[in-house]
Amino acid sequence: MRKKIVAGNWKMHKTLPETEVLIKELRELVDTENKVSVIIAPTFVNLTSAVNLAKGSDITVAAQNMHFEDAGAYTGEISADMLQVIEVNTVILGHSERRAYFCETDDILKLKAIQAYKKGMTNIFCVGEKLAERKENKHFEIVEKQLINALFTLPAEAFEKIVIAYEPVWAIGTGETASPEQAQEMHQFIRKVVEAQYGKSVADKLRILYGGSVKPGNAKEIFSKPDVDGGLIGGAALQAKDFNAIIEAGKS
Ligand code: 13P
């Protein structure tokens, strides 16, 4: 049995005082009963506070991005060491917003994935097709390429710390969700692609999260699908009650 993960990507939301309030609320509400792994990804400047506020709880703090070099003249960037020194050992890589607005290509993401592996960090790696690509029936091909190009030079052992997040771009922040059947179909495909490259035992252990307008009202049905191992949540992760309801949906 793969333990489900419910991760909240806070994107560019929540100031420091707001971060403190939300984590305090979550600490009061969330009881994972050790059935779900809970992750939150606040913005960089609030990570230190978030780590301190989450200490002793079941909540793990992640970053939303990082650079692939150890250090250097990269104005505005954040390194793996900077994150790990403040006890952040999980990072979201390849989110479609990073790909679309910050020109992150498969080649860049490959370097970032290598860096996460070298540093022993958990890599929540995002893949997903755009609406036009789905309409042209290219969604499987697109997702397969994203996986192969960025991840498949890594050795099998790297997959112990890789989580895939399937986030169809057309479902992010739009209120439109992939149907549970569409999610299952893609997750099963992703597992097959990983199995073909790395074998069944790696594929069987891999957690594949669905992201894209997951809400308290639809989480349970999406999470009930056999290849859906939890969710990467945007908007609904910004409200403690909603996020907790999604965590609860992950328990069954
Ligand atoms: P929404 O849940 O707001 O659609 O965002 C999903 C997402 O992009 C999580 O990374």
Image (cartoon, helix red, strand yellow):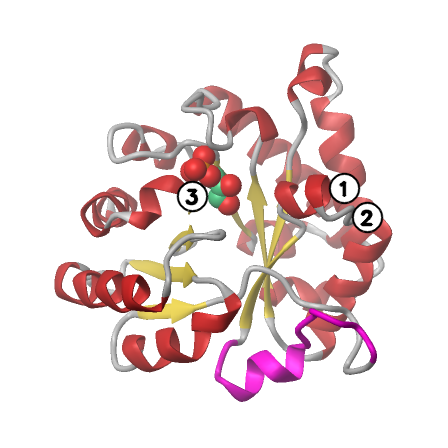
Which residue is located at x 14 percent, y 59 percent?
29
Q: Measured from the top left, where is residue 114 in percent x and y?
A: 77, 68
Instruction: Say whether residue 25 is left or right of residue 213.
Output: left
**Residue at 51% in and 32% down:** 172
- Find disc 2 in the rendering and name its residue: 106
Camera-side residue: 90 or 10?
10
Depth-wise, is mark 2 or mark 1 nearer the camera? 2
Quadrant for the C terminus, please. top left
Q: What stretch is highlighted in magenta?
A: 73-88
Q: Between disc 2 and disc 1, whose residue precedes?
A: 2
Whole-Å distance between the Cαs marked 2 and 1? 6 Å
Give the spatial CA distance, label 3 vs label 1.
21 Å
**Residue type, mark 1 in image:** Gln
Q: Evaluate whether residue 1 shows in this view.
A: no
**Badge 3 amino acid:** Gly
Q: Is residue 143 left or right of residue 230?
A: right
Marks 3, 1: nearer the viewer: 3
Disc 3 designates what residue? Answer: 234
Residue 164 seen in this snapshot: yes
Q: Are circles 2 and 3 on residues that touch, CB within 8 Å? A: no
> Mark 2 and 1 residues: CB-CB less than 8 Å, in contact?
yes
